[in-house]
Every structure is written in C-alpha cells, then in structure tokens.
Image (tube, helix red, strand yellow):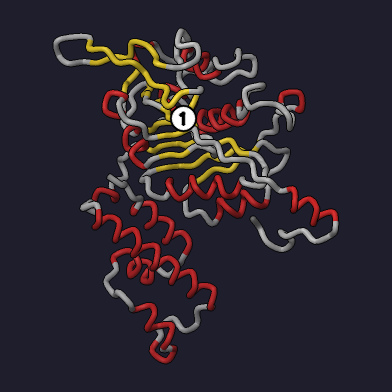
Amino acid sequence: MSLLNVYSLQRRLKRKLPYVLIVLFLIFGYFGGFFSDLVSSAERDPFAELSSSTLKKILNLERENQRLRSALKRFNIAEDEYLDSTLSVIYVITPTYTRPQQKAELTRLKNIFLHIPSLHWIVVEDAEEKSILVSQFLKLSGLPYTHLNQPTPEEWKLQKTDPNWRKPRGVLQRNLGIHWLRRKFTAGNIRKGVVYFADDDNTYSIELFNEMRDTKTVSVWPVGLVGGVMVERPQISLVDYQSRYEVSGWLTGWRPDRPFATDMAGFAVNLNLLVKNPDAEFSLKSKRGFMESDFLEKITTLSELEPKADLCTKVYVWHTQTLKPDLKDEERLRKAGRSTDVGIEV
C-alpha cells in the first residue's frame, strides 16, 4: 500500500504561500477547476495582483494535490490517516558526492520519499562546501530536509581505478548525520522516530518505509542484488510456543559468520536507541565488509533484532548502483569549447 504525505504537503503549502484561503482550496479540492478560471478571467480574479510566478506555483501545487488525492483514492486510503502528527518520523541519512549522475540519483529518491508520511531527509555532501546543485534541488524538493556537508580526507577517497570495496564510503557523512540527530534530540528531548541510512544509488520500494516505522530497537530485512548474490537476508527461527521469531543467522555469499552480515540498506535503528548510545557510529578503520556489523554491535544483539518484510521473505530494497555514464564525446566537445551542459543543469 502506498503511503502519501498529505499532512506534510499541507504544511509545505502553508509555509510557501501566505494566502491561507488559496491553500485551503488546494488541500480540500472544493473548487476543482477554480484556479484555471481565475487565470483566464482576470476581471473575476480576486487575486489579480498576484505575480505570474506565484500563479504558476499555485497551479503546480494544485496539480500535485490532485495527483496525491488520486493516488489515495486508487489505494483506498483515508486521507485522515495522513493528518496524524503522532506518526514516528523516519530520518533518512543519505551521503552524496558530485558526479554526472548525482541529480538523477537524488531525483529517484525524492520521488519515493514524497510518498512517505513524516519523513525527514538528511543529505550530507562529501564536499568542502555545500553545492548549488544540491542546495537548489533540496529547496525545490517539497520535502522536510537538512543539508549538511563533510569532506572525506584525500587519503580515504577512492581513486578512479579503485573498485568500490577498496575503501569505505560515506562514513564521515553518515556520522555527521548521526551527530546532527544527537544535537537535535538530547536525552530529555527525544521523540518517536527511526533512522535509516539510504545511499543515493540504491532502489527503494515504498513498502520498505512502512515496515521500518515501528522499529523498537533495530529492524532488519533482505537486500537484493548485493554481495555477489541475488539476495542477502537474515535467517529466521521460531523460538517459542507463542510463535515468536528471531534472527538466528545470515544467508549471504560472503562471510556469513560476521556478527551482523547485513548491507547498509538492510536495517533501521530506533532514534532513541541511537541517541542514547554516543559511541554508535561508523568507523573508517573497520575491516572490509565489517562496517555495518561493527556499528550494530555497539547498539544491539542478534536476539534483539526485529525481522521485517514478512519474516524476511520479501525484498523491498535493491543495491542497484547506477552505471557510470560514458562521457567520452562530452570530453571531446569540452576540449573544443562546445560543452553540451553550458547554461543547463543536468
């Protein structure tokens, strides 16, 4: 079932437009094609003084509102479900870095996150300064977000010819996201929430976020197309007569003997648990393939894990990794002073 963030949409509309009456029209849809009539008939337009850019924003918001309402109707979901401010917030931490496909990757994530109620996106650039591209992208995303930056030291960066596994990636960026959460939520100021580490080159299903929202400690699930196998997943065992199941091990192609043989995309952490364990962060010194395991060992045990996704029998996330684009012709044109992306953001 698709969960759409109508509540967050309402807040965004109110924040962006000072015209409360217009916002109410947009949210509740009482007037259908009213806005198109307003634009075409200026003499009857009570908002004739609005600029063309403001009217364009209104029309775009109306289209988005209708799309979201149609999706709710299609999945037979009551709109009241998304007016519940008591939902646990999902804090998604995404490391990112400048490359030709960066905006495309972030756009794919944004289009999924817009369907998730009560989601806050923490995007951390691996850079000395925040880029204009990511800043503008987040500003226009329609999502609640926090934009941070943390450069990786040169000695820890992958070189062009290095395979992805040669050095850990996104370590300092994920840790900065964790530190931001700890500053925001002190021991006496913690709300219901869950933290998920979503790399920008993976593929995520909406159902995944439904699964993780009620995480009490650490929840786990399968990850597709990772580690040289079709799927890496926790193995589940029945532990008592009350039909209680626990994670008993791991089905992976590489080092299933790791204490927590899971991919970064394969778990979520309760916000309170993360905040209350100040030593819980990722390490640049972890052995290859042990970064996730070393992190989880600091906050949980195997028996405390919460198996999700129908007892880990369904795949809702895939380690797809976008193919690096072949830009040899772009390089040729650039040397000739004819770059194709001059004046246009790709």
Q: Is residue 215 above or below residue 255?
A: below
Q: Classify 10 Å Cα crowding around label 1: few (below 14), some (14-19), many (20 and above).
A: some
Q: Split into 4 quadrants, where in the image is the N terminus?
A: top left
Q: Is residue 177 left or right of residue 130?
A: left
Which residue is found at the position 42% from the left and 34% from the top?
A: 317
Q: Nearer the viewer, residue 182 or 254?
A: 254
Q: Nearer the viewer, residue 344 or 126?
A: 344
What is the quadrant of residue 31 in the picture?
bottom left
Q: Nearer the viewer, residue 231 or 204?
A: 231
Whether residue 330 is visible here, answered yes or no, is: yes
Q: Is residue 325 above or below residue 282?
A: below
Q: Which residue is mark 1?
A: 225
Q: Is residue 97 left or right of residue 183?
A: right
What is the quadrant of residue 148 in the picture?
top right
Which residue is found at the position 58% from the left and 43% from the top?
A: 147
Q: Is residue 75 left or right of residue 292?
A: left
Q: Residue furthest left?
A: 241
Count of marks placed on residues: 1
**Picture coordinates of residue 192 (x, y %)?**
36, 32
Whether residue 268 is visible here, answered yes or no, is: no
**Picture coordinates of residue 248 (x, y %)?**
33, 10
Which residue is found at the position 30% from the left and 26% from the top?
A: 313
**Picture coordinates of residue 7 (x, y %)?**
34, 52
Which residue is found at the position 62% from the left and 49% from the top?
A: 134
Mark 1 lies on a secondary structure that is strand
Q: Split into 4 quadrants, where in the image is the C terminus?
A: bottom right
Task: Give the residue type at disc 1.
Answer: Leu
